[in-house]
Image (cartoon, rainbow, N blue to C red):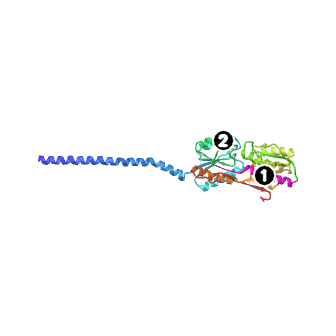
Amino acid sequence: MKRKLLSVLLCVGMIAAMVSGCGQKSEEAAAPAADDAAAKETAAPAADDAEKTADSGEKVKVILITMDSSDQHWVSVDKGAKEEAEKLGNVDYKWMAPDKKDDAQQIERVNNAVADGADAIMIAANGPDAITAVLEDAKSQGVKIIYVDSPANTEAMATFSTDNKAAGKTAGEEMLKALKAAGKEEGKIGIVNISASTDSTANREAGFREAFEGTPYEILETQYGEGDAAKSQDIADNYITDGCVGIFGCNEGATVGTGNAIKGAGGGVIGVGFDKSDAILGLIKDGSLVACMAQNPDVMGKMGMDAAVAAVKGEPIPETNVDTGVSVLTKDSIQ
C-alpha cells in the first residue's frame, strides 16, 4: 500500500513538473511574438508617412497672395488658380490679398499664410526687396514659393509671368504707330506707373522707353499713382495740361486713370495701357485709349497651382520660368 501511494505521489510530482515546464516554454515562445507585434506597430507610422509623401489623397494647402484684391487682373489670377485647384481635387485653396498695394500688408499676409499652415504660397510680389526676408523665413519652414506675375529677389520653385520688358516695348511700338497715324511726329510722352519698386511695371516702363530711343519724342519723368485709378487720373490730367501727345499707363489702375483723363479732355491724346478689364475695354471702344497689352492672368493662376502642388508632393515641375504672353487689344480686335 505504501509502495502504491509512493508511486502515485511520484507520478503527480512528475506531471506537475512537466506542466510547469510547458507553461514556461509557452511564455518564452510568446514573448518574441509580442515584441514582433510592437515592432510592427512602431513601424506603421513610418509606412503611413511614406504613403502620404507619395500621394495619400491628403489635401495640399495652397494660398495665393496678390498685390491687392481690387484689380480685375488679380481676380483673374484667382479664378485660374481656383479652377485648377478644383480640377486637381486634392487642394485646400485660399486667396489672401491686401486691400491696397502696400508692402507691410503683403508681409502680414505671408506671415498669416505660414501661420495658417500653407504648404505652398503663390505670390505676386509688390516689390522685389521688401518682401524677400519674410519669404526666406517661410521657405526655411518648408513652405514652397511660386511666383505669379511679379517675383521678388529670392529663389522660388517656379515663376509664371509676362516678359514685361518685351511687352512694354510692344506698347511703345503701338503708341508710335498711333502717333504717326494721327500726324503727331514729335512731342512729350507721359508715363503713369505704380511705384519705382514694383519690378513688373518697372520693366514695362523700361521696354516702353526703349521703343522711343532715337525718336524725336521726349519721354517725361515718370509719375506714380500707386495703381489707384483716381490718383492716376490726376497725374494724367497734369500731363495733358503740360501738352503731352501720348500717355502710357503701366497697369490696370494707371490705364483706367489715363483713359478717363483723355476722355475728360475730349480726346486728342494717344493713350496706351496695360491689363484687361471691363473699364479698359470700354475706354478702347469709345476711343479714349488706342490699345492695351492684355496679359493672361488666368494662365498664371492655373500654371502656378499645378507647380505648387507638384512642388509640395516632390514631383518635377515641367517648366520653371514661363512667359505667359500678352495680346494687343485695339478697337478693331475687340469688336
Residue at the spot 13% in from the left edge and 48% down from the top edge: 4
Q: Is residue 105 above or below residue 91?
A: above
Is residue 300 found left or right of 268 in the rendered image? Answer: left
Residue at disc 1, secondary structure: helix
Q: Is residue 180 magenta?
A: yes
Secondary structure mostly seen in magenta is: helix
In the image, residue 99 lies at what x, y percent? 69, 44
Kind of residue sitting beneath label 2: Thr
Which residue in the protein does label 2 denote? 132
Q: Earlier in the sequence, mark 1 or mark 2?
A: 2
Residue 247 at x, y percent in the picture: 82, 48
* Residue 250 shows in the view: no
Task: Give x and y (percent) for residue 90.
Answer: 57, 53
The answer to whether residue 31 is visible is yes
Q: Which residues are magenta?
A: 158-182
Residue at the spot of label 1: 171
Nearer the observer, 127 or 226: 127
What separation in Å lies between label 1 and label 2 (alpha carbons)? 30 Å
Residue at the location (64% across, 40% down)? 133
Name which residue type carries label 1: Ala
Give how far across and how far down residue 129 sits, in percent: 69, 41
Relative placement, left or right, of 103 versus 266 is left
